[in-house]
Amino acid sequence: MFIEQIKDIHSNKRTLDEDEVKRNDPVVLAYIGDSLYDLYVRCRLIYTGDYKSGDLHKMSVKYVCAHGQARALDMIEDILTEDEENIVRRAKNAKINPPKNCDRNTYIKATAFEALAGYLYLTMKNQRLEEIFRLVYDKASMNS
């Protein structure tokens, strides 16, 4: 789906091997992961109905915010591989400064979810990334 369409962005560049990606700062992985999840949610919402952009934004915020992403991590923690658990653990231990409107625990979990997404994308594990995004989106949609 959308992962296949955007993977060409870095196909002309040198790809990173898995060890290089794992050595990346988890906050850097979270930077790309946040964008990917935001794009995924926006694409899914567009295909669910004919909404105005303001409505789409309001709908996407419940998924793509610290609280939504922290809940997303809770939904998938029991299905993570050992490598994925290690990325999540490193991200949880990263030095981050949460914004004033979010408690530290929630922000740390959200960052860990984003870092996992960034890791999966940069290691070209697109099928796994889409599996996780689909699972989280579908579960979150049922709960709202």
Image: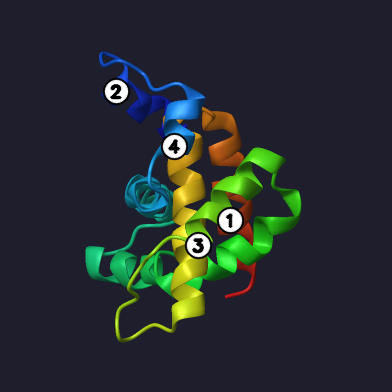
Q: Secondary structure at mark 1?
A: helix
The residue that label 4 is drawn on is 23
The residue that label 3 is drawn on is 93
Q: Nearer the viewer, residue 143 or 78?
A: 78
For the residues labelled 1 and 4, the Cα–Cα distance comes to: 13 Å
Rendering coords of residue 93 (x, y %): 50, 62
The residue under the point 39% across, 70% down is 65
Cβ atoms under marks 1 and 4 closer than 8 Å:
no
For the residues labelled 3 and 2, the Cα–Cα distance comes to: 28 Å
The three-letter code of the residue at mark 2 reads His
The answer to whether 124 appears left or right of 89 in the picture is: left
Instruction: State which quarter of the image contains the C terminus.
Output: bottom right
Rendering coords of residue 13 (x, y %): 26, 16
Question: 120 above or below 137?
Answer: above
The three-letter code of the residue at mark 1 reads Arg
The three-letter code of the residue at mark 4 reads Arg
Q: Secondary structure at mark 4?
A: helix
For the residues labelled 1 and 2, the Cα–Cα distance comes to: 27 Å
Cβ atoms under marks 1 and 3 closer than 8 Å:
yes
- The residue positioned farthest toward the right in the image shown: 78
Q: Nearer the viewer, residue 119 or 23?
A: 23
Q: Secondary structure at mark 2?
A: helix
Q: Nearer the viewer, residue 41 or 119?
A: 119
Q: Earlier in the sequence, mark 3 or mark 4?
A: 4
Q: Which corner quadrant of the image does residue 107 belong to?
A: bottom left
* Residue 138 seen in the figure: yes
Q: Residues within 10 Å of mark 1 (few under 14, many from 20)?
A: some
The three-letter code of the residue at mark 3 reads Asn
The residue that label 1 is drawn on is 89
